[in-house]
Image (cartoon, rainbow, N blue to C red):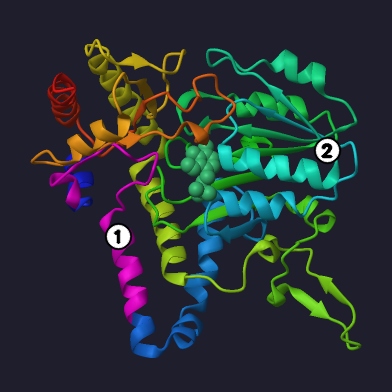
Amino acid sequence: MDIELQRTNTPHCRQLIHFNNAGASLVPVPVSLTIEQYLKLEQELGPYEAQRKNSVAIDKIYVDCARFLNCQPNEIALTSGATQAWYVLLHAINWQKGDKILLTNLEYGGFYLALLQLQKIYDLELEVIPVNKGIFDLAGLKARLNNKVKLVSISHLASHGGAVLPVREIGELLQKYPCYYAVDVAQSIGQLPIDVENIQCDFLIGTGRKYLRAPRGTGFLYVRAQHLPQLTAFFANSRYVNLADDKQNFTLHTNSARIFEAWESCYAIRLGLAEAMLYAEKVGLNQIWQRIQLLAHYLQEQIASIPQLQPANQERDASGIMLWNSPYSALEISRALQQREKPINIEPWNAASSPLMQFANNNTQLLRFSPHYYNTIEEIDEVVTSLKEVIAKF
Ligand SMILES: Cc1ncc(COP(=O)(O)O)c(C=O)c1O
């Protein structure tokens, strides 16, 4: 990978050290140019007129997403982020009292809240499969599968980092059972290759702004086409509804996941999302993953030399996201790092994002570091030196 080229395409990485890519990444120049050009066109032509003029490019967003995930364009709905995708999906499933949902303790906080709401509305059962020290208990999942299980929800890579779950092996196992299989790739998309055929999932939920380097406000939902006729969009997009002549009845389209989209959207950032996927493909997902692991491994080793910080994840981190326990305020440490001559961005991590994890209590002070491929070994050294200086002042 040509790191200098990647850094040139990420101009502000020379003015600051951005280790908060699990929050939101810095977008590369081709992505920001795509957005700026489209917004300019809206000013020049009028927003509706710009949309009509760009209808081919706007339709191609779905083609680009489909290629990126290895699915069909009609299996993609674009959303404002992963949580919106999760909500529209959950409320489209035909739940029956007593249906069961299996999830893990890695479930993202917002996703877990949505499941709790659903549980109360439909009288469902939730069961958490614990992931201990990064090991997913495949036999434990198998033992829990029966006709009551309607959905298995797996977080591919949690918000706090740690293990990358074996989504392909889980998908393989679930083929023999009549349940839906949903995978949350909010943190893994753009970090490693994702292929829905390989995972054999029914649904995939993702967000653009993290490792994919797309703008904020972008996300997607993949729905396997065969399930579309069984799902009912709760929030119907009038573009995909046929209102009967009597104006009393209607039918929803069943051949496109776009039924799950809101009517209104910002086309500039959606074009940015497609450009970010194209960009990641050009850099190479395998190369990105290798580079992130290399940087993460080095960063982990260097932080371990700071005696005041303790690793919060029990397993050895395999991804770019790592969490460390601090005896001092995480917020104050991160603020002090931002006030350095060259600002350093790390995240004072909010334990509510992973509410089912053991370390998640309100007093824990956690620092999340999440480098991307455009970061460097020299930056890691600078972050660790700065951290030592900041911590010494507490
Ligand atoms: C693992 C995981 N899932 C889902 C989400 C939610 O994504 P969004 O904020 O785009 O809704 C996040 C956000 O941090 C996340 O880390």
Residue at figure coordinates x 47%, y 88% from the top left: 49
Residue at figure coordinates x 35%, y 82% from the top left: 41
Q: Tell me, for residue 160, which label it has, or none.
A: none
Whether residue 321 appears in this view of the structure is: yes
* Left or right: 245 in relation to 302: right
Query: Observer-nearest residue: 79 or 348?
Result: 348
**Of helix, strand and loop, which one carries label 2?**
loop
Magenta-highlighted residues: 12-40
Return the x and y of residue 165 as percentages of the image width and height: 57, 25
Return the x and y of residue 388 as percentages of the image width and height: 16, 20
Q: Amino acid at mark 2?
A: Leu
Query: Observer-nearest residue: 117 or 239?
Result: 117
Q: Which residue is mark 1?
A: 30
Residue at figure coordinates x 55%, y 60% from the top left: 63
**Of helix, strand and loop, which one carries label 1?**
helix
Position of residue 115 relative to residue 324, above or below, is: below
* Left or right: 7 in relation to 318: left
C-alpha gap between disc 1 and disc 2:
46 Å
Return the x and y of residue 207 as percentages of the image width and height: 50, 49
Q: Is residue 240 magenta?
A: no
Specify the quadrant of the image occupied by residue 13: top left
Q: Which residue is mark 2?
A: 124
